[in-house]
């Protein structure tokens, strides 16, 4: 038996086929091979056509089925992971009214800030666990204010993954976890955020049907089955935003468990059972995939914008295009602390963890007579790890202790220097796994359809590739971090 996992990103759509017997990936593909186009009518805007997502999904799925060479009747369920915070608006006929306003579009920042001020910090942080910010509800308010003729046609709104599920099944649905990522859920009432909707002048009837994250939401229609080459009646049985799904793919489900990613930007995602937000809203809190009113599971998300993008910038500029392996080799010839060089990686836009300040990237302590490439390459990786520690300390004050951090063995976690610095500065065990978002969605689908009895069975075949523990340099790294922190200005 197999399940399909779909991972809708802003760059591509990836599809993976999971073998439920041994937990292996039977086949995987993504489209397009170049990054998906973004529509930017104005500076700070970012939109994509949902119909393009669907076309890329079809191409990726076609490749997977050809590569796998299996009988499609062996596919028993579908799970979906997706880029968070986007807005998809459909009319009564299920047609897309306008391009999706996606996660990195900043047009609604002022709307969210005004809402936070006028609704009050107490209500927003207590009931929504966040400022309305530049999230989905605020984007919908922007459409209401600026495109009233289009707003009037809206029958239902969805998140990007909800749209893919709709195209598969014909059912307009979403989840509690999804509504929380759009800041449309009241955690105190365990219901849609009626006060926010009233303030924005938006009717709650625009929300689609609510379904449980792990459940048989709806079934692939006859017409779509013929279009895609899969059997009709397969359930869509799981959907989640990319960061909650990344945590799920690493079996991070219970309070105290922590997941991390370190690509262009970096994320630490910890699970809590507390509804206590950060009073400065430097991290975001959402309902995790297994959240219920009776057993609260809150995913607390720290994002560092300047992570792998700093390493990439150094490779292209200071490294003249050398490989990351060569950069790591040069960095390894320099001792812990980079001989006094400190790097601050905050050069990729406003950092929420720094209270939305944008101080830019910075190199301190550079000697023009004694320091070389290796010092800067190492200091950059240490600085990225230090920025994670800065955010994790905020999460710690909210009750999340990062004693074990799970991550995919990819991106920055391929660097021995980075992962050892992370282990030391967090005083945590780092566990690295061979998994990704599409495989996580496929596992979620199997749980939701009852093909696995529970998450424990779903992850029984997930193999840990590497474990990194704090080493003898931990105290020295702590001292360097404190110097780094004391010199941080924003």
Image: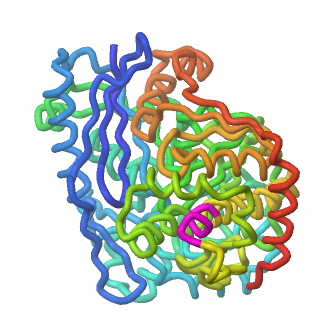
In this rendered view, identify the residue nearer to me: 260 or 174: 260
Q: Which region of the structure is painted magenta?
A: 372-378
| Whether residue 102 can be seen here | no
In this rendered view, identify the residue nearer to me: 129 or 263: 263
Residue 31 painted magenta: no
Q: Relative to 9, is 466 above or below?
A: above
Q: Whole-percent x and y of residue 61? A: 21, 37
| Whether residue 35 can be seen here | yes
Q: Quadrant of residue 7?
A: top left
Report the side of 336 relative to 218 (left or right): right
Report the side of 84 relative to 128 (left or right): left
Q: Relative to 222, is 161 above or below?
A: below
Q: Residue at x 23, y 46 (%)?
A: 57
Q: Quadrant of residue 37?
A: bottom left
In this rendered view, identify the residue nearer to me: 119 or 242: 242
Q: Residue at x 56, y 21 (%)?
A: 459
Q: Whole-percent x and y of residue 264? A: 48, 62
- Dominant secondary structure of the residues highlighted in magenta in the image: helix
Report the side of 301 relative to 263 (left or right): right
Q: Whole-percent x and y of residue 23? A: 44, 18
Q: Relative to 133, is 395 above or below?
A: above
Colour setting: rainbow
Q: Residue at x 53, y 38 (%)?
A: 213
The extreme front residue here reads 369
Q: Relative to 295, is 479 above or below?
A: below
Q: Residue at x 77, y 36 (%)?
A: 294
- Quadrant where the C terminus sits is bottom right
State how many labels appear. 0
- Quadrant where the N terminus sits is top left
């Amino acid at each position: 038996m197999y399940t399909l996992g779909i991972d809708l990103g802003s760059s591509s759509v990836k599809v993976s086929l999971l073998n439920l017997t041994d937990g292996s990936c039977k086949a995987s593909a993504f489209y397009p091979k170049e990054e998906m186009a973004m529509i930017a009518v104005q500076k700070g805007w970012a939109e994509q056509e949902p119909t393009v997502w669907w076309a890329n999904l079809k191409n990726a799925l076609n490749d997977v089925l050809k590569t796998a060479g299996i009988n499609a009747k062996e596919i028993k369920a579908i799970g979906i992971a997706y880029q968070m915070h986007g807005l998809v608006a459909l009319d009564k006929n299920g047609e897309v009214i306008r391009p999706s306003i996606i996660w990195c579009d900043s047009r609604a920042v002022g709307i969210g800030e005004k809402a936070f001020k006028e609704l009050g910090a107490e209500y927003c942080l207590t009931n929504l666990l966040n400022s309305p910010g530049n999230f989905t509800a605020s984007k919908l308010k922007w459409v209401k204010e600026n495109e009233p003729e289009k707003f009037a046609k809206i029958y239902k709104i969805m998140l990007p993954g909800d749209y893919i599920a709709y195209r598969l099944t014909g059912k307009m649905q979403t989840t509690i976890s999804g509504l929380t990522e759009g800041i449309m859920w009241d955690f105190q009432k365990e219901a849609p955020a009626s006060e926010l909707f009233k303030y924005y002048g938006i009717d709650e009837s625009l929300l689609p049907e609510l379904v449980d994250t792990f459940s048989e939401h709806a079934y692939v229609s006859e017409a779509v089955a013929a279009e895609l080459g899969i059997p009709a009646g397969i359930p869509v049985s799981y959907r989640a935003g990319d960061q909650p799904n990344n945590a799920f793919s690493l079996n991070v489900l219970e309070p105290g468990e922590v997941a991390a990613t370190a690509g262009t930007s970096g994320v630490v995602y910890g699970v809590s059972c507390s509804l206590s937000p950060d009073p400065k809203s430097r991290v975001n809190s959402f309902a995790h995939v297994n959240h219920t009113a009776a057993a609260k599971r809150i995913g607390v998300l720290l994002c560092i914008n300047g992570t792998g993008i700093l390493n990439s910038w150094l490779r292209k500029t200071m490294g003249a295009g050398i490989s990351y392996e060569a950069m790591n080799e040069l960095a390894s010839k320099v001792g812990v602390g980079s001989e006094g060089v400190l790097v601050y990686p905050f050069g990729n836009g406003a950092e929420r963890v720094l209270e939305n300040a944008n101080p830019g990237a910075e190199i301190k302590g550079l000697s023009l007579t004694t320091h070389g490439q290796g010092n800067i390459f190492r200091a950059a990786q240490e600085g990225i790890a230090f920025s994670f520690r800065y955010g994790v300390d905020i999460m710690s004050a909210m009750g999340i202790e990062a004693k074990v951090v799970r991550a995919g063995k990819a991106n920055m976690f391929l660097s021995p220097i980075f992962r050892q610095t992370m282990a030391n500065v967090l005083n945590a065990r780092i566990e690295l796994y061979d998994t990704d978002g599409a495989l996580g969605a496929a596992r979620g689908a199997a749980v939701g359809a009852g093909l696995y009895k529970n998450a424990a069975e779903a992850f029984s075949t997930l193999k840990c590739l590497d474990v990194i523990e704090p080493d003898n340099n931990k105290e020295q790294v702590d001292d360097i971090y404190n110097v780094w922190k004391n010199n941080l200005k924003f």
